[in-house]
Image: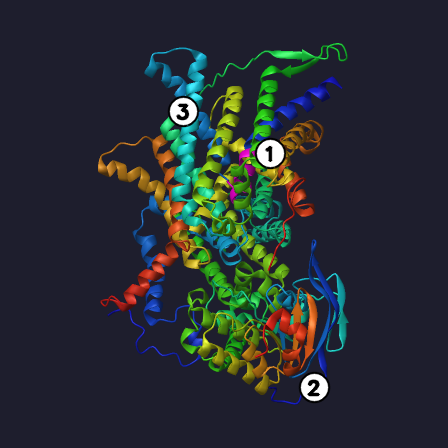
Amino acid sequence: MAGRPIGEVILDVHNLSLRFGGVKALSDISFDVREHEIRAIIGPNGAGKSSMLNCINGVYQPQEGSISLRGQTFRHMNSRQVAQMGVARTFQNLALFKGMSVLDNLMTGRHLKMRANLFQQAIRWGAAEREETEQRVVVERIIDFLEIQPYRKIQVGRLPYGLQKRVDLGRALATEPQVLLLDEPMAGMNVEEKQDMSRFILDVNDEFGTTIVLIEHDMSVVMDISDRVVVLNYGRKIGDGLPEEVRTNPEVVSAYLGTVH
Amino acid sequence: MGPFLETLLGGLMVGMLYSLVALGLVLIFKASGVFNFAQGAMVLFAALAMARFAEWLPHLTGYDNKFVNNVLAFAGAALVMVLFAWVVQKLVLGKLVNQEGITLLMATLGITYFIEGAGQMLFGNDIYKIDVGMPKDPMFLFEKTFQGGILVNQEDLAAALIAAVLVALLALFFQKTATGRALRAVADDHQAAQSIGIPLDRIWVIVWSVAGIVALVAGAIWGSKLGVQFSLSLVALKALPVVILGGLTSIPGAIIGGLLIGVGEKLSEIYLGPHLGGGIEIWFAYVLALVFLLVRPQGLFGEKIIDRV
Amino acid sequence: MLYRENGQFKTSYRADQQIFPILQDRIAIALFLAFAFVAVPLLGSEYFLRAILIPFLILSLAALGLNILVGYCGQISLGTGAFMAVGAYGAYNFMVRIDGMPLIVALLLGGLMSTAVGVLFGIPSLRIKGLYLAVATLAAQFFADWAFLRVPFFTHSSSSGSVSVASLSVFGLPIESPISKYLFCLSFLCVFGLLAKNLVRGHIGREWMAIRDMDVAAAVIGIRPVYAKLTAFAVSSFIVGVAGALWGFVYLGSWEPAAFSIDRSFQLLFMVIIGGLGSIMGSFFGAAFIVILPLMLSQVPQWLGIPLSVVTASHLEFMIFGALIVFFLVVEPHGLARLWSTAKEKLRLWPFPH
């Protein structure tokens, strides 16, 4: 549950449709996300959840519909612009920079804050060194928060899956986002790891007020921590509202949940 | 008009030779997603093998029938290429199964250097002859329409015929046979193909063997025309622009791309060359490919490349 | 016992971010540089300096440039020879057409020419990757081969097709003897090596690696692929161009386009692969390896008493190169540099096994 009072609409999706050749990934999807809330997107595999996030980030360009961010409406999102507007995300398949260390991965998240130009960086002494150190301070706070201090110099490709997931989250957090899109952050984790991850997500929402949009399959997690839920099935929205409402929605139950728990 | 047509035909003939090399490239790419930089070196290697076998066999068997000799030499060289395919699969491809394209490309670069050295060490580095009994006399066609007729090389015509037959056979193989289907499945997605039980390593040996035999045919034809020498592998570098033009996954594309490049080179040399100082053949094909890469990277007949996240 | 980090606690991020955080490394590097700048010129024979060290230094520089593009940013280039040529001919033209042009300025200007061409040929990289990009860089290679042969402007209308440079000097000091040439090249390598290392451990280096590893995720963070790729091409071709100019001016003295042919491109690519992609040290290892190998091939059989003809040796060289490329790609894709750092790791623990 959100720590702060839920605010105005910060992200609004209008009638979004996305096609790949003949396959319709999303059909006429509309929903909104309010500031400071934790909004879950659930649905069976292939329902279009990741595609939805990809549209918000500008990775895919939807054929129809538009997306509003902080009142500004866009037909097509540009990845960099979206990042500049304070939206960050993690990826289902962990799009980490495998060749770099944990520290370097997180430091890339500070990209938009880096100002030193090429020449300053080549000389390093002076402006670039100062900036590098300043940003390091910020990133170390995130490392402390996620409890990954012992791994900071290790190449991420070598870390176990659960830790990689945390690095993915850390990189997104390093961008100091206002909206955080999490694509199945707990996939493949055991109970303990899920508890840790839930705690991190709730802490981020609580301490920094970050709005969270969360794709997740674990229903107990969804019911526990989210404020509102959107349900997708075959690219269509079949449910939208409070967790209890969605849980008892017959269409949702038959499509996804099975029997009512 | 006469000279223009002669240039055109000359270009078509050279282009057809490019196509033959490109064919091997397309085969391997279609079936394994690997871009085989070594295809040109394979042409040289195969041709060297055949040329030398043809020389050595009479001494070994004491038999001197030229036709039988050539057939045996061809068969021997084909066997060498199959063996080569097996070794490549075992030592290179099998170990680099899930690596990215760049890694595999660089591996084929390594293979190129290796067989360039090995081929010459095993078979020698002089210029060798392949004599497959191709008719060498020129013909004059259309004597009534054009004065003196158009000079056409009978050897080139025969080569064109062989190439056409080869392409038809390959196209049939890919479309109609079970192995061909399996090859296409593998090209699409290695892991998926593996998961339905297609034996990747055997498939790749087959593909590389076929490509090796295609290289042998190309080498035999080319060697018969120009003599088998080291520069053969350099000419084969032209095969890359050919597949860019035609599309990496298209057999007809390899043929048409080859012809276009062959004709384009000759025509551009004659008509554009003098204005630019001559010798533009070395870059014409590549610059043309560059233009295609910017405008239509999948080439004329290739499949569109989609990047999925 | 010798190589330990014990007791070397870093009390500031700045100390942690140094190029050589471990004290023993810093001492080793200082000793090595002293050796290179002082001992080698005094002790090395003329042949050793002229025929082995100078080409090694210049090719290391070129490999460094190529490694930035291929190893750090993941953009393949088969046209490095062309960029070296642009640097060489560019510097040459500045030298002969402008009176009193200082040598170092000419070399750097040659590098800038190469940068311009590099950025131009980097533009396709925004749309195409991997193999397709390789073909584009080959177009650059063949076009350069032709242009420097057939376009009279580039060779200052030289009748023989080759160009040469007269006596070189820096601030009045002549660069003629092997020792002076060696020190000149060594200085360039050290300066450029340091600048490159700074770039690579700085933010732009992370941008390059991000594009290499996962360009979609990089875009989502706000990294602009255009900027990252074009700067990689720019920096890489600048360094390669300067190396090319050094190759022509200092090592060859007079040259033709064939000095920068496709064989040179492949040679540099091999250096980078064998030495280690994405590693500054790797570029040096790779260059050393490729320079030494032909020498070994000609000397070792003699020592063993097995005579090898020159021709066979050259075939063997091809085979060994090819086999080594495949070997490294299969067994240690990070090349000699990884082997080196693994050895150092073991040394840190020595005499304990783990």
Q: Residues within 10 Å of mark 1 (few under 14, many from 20)?
A: some
As helix, strand or loop, the secondary structure at mark 1 comes to helix
Q: Give me the chain letter of mark 2.
A: A
Q: What type is the residue that disc 2 sits on?
A: Gly
Q: Which residues are magenta?
A: B22-36
User: How was the colour assigned to the protein in this rendering?
Assistant: rainbow
What chain letter is assigned to the residue under label 3?
B
Tag 3 residue: B76
Q: Secondary structure at mark 3?
A: helix
Q: Going 55% across and 61% down the picture, which residue do you hit? A: C214
Residue C122 in sight here = yes
Quadrant housing the C terminus of chain C: bottom left
Is residue B225 toward the left or the right of residue B255 in the image? left
Q: Position of residue C297 (x, y in %)?
A: 32, 39
Helix, strand or loop at mark 2 = loop
Nearest to the observer: residue A104 or residue C158: A104
| Residue picked out by circle 1 | B282
CB of mark 2 within 8 Å of CB of mark 3?
Answer: no
Q: Specify the amino acid type for callout 3.
A: Gly
Asked if badge 2 and badge 3 are on a common chain, one would say no
**x 62%, y 28%: residue:** B15
**Mark 1 falls within which chain?**
B
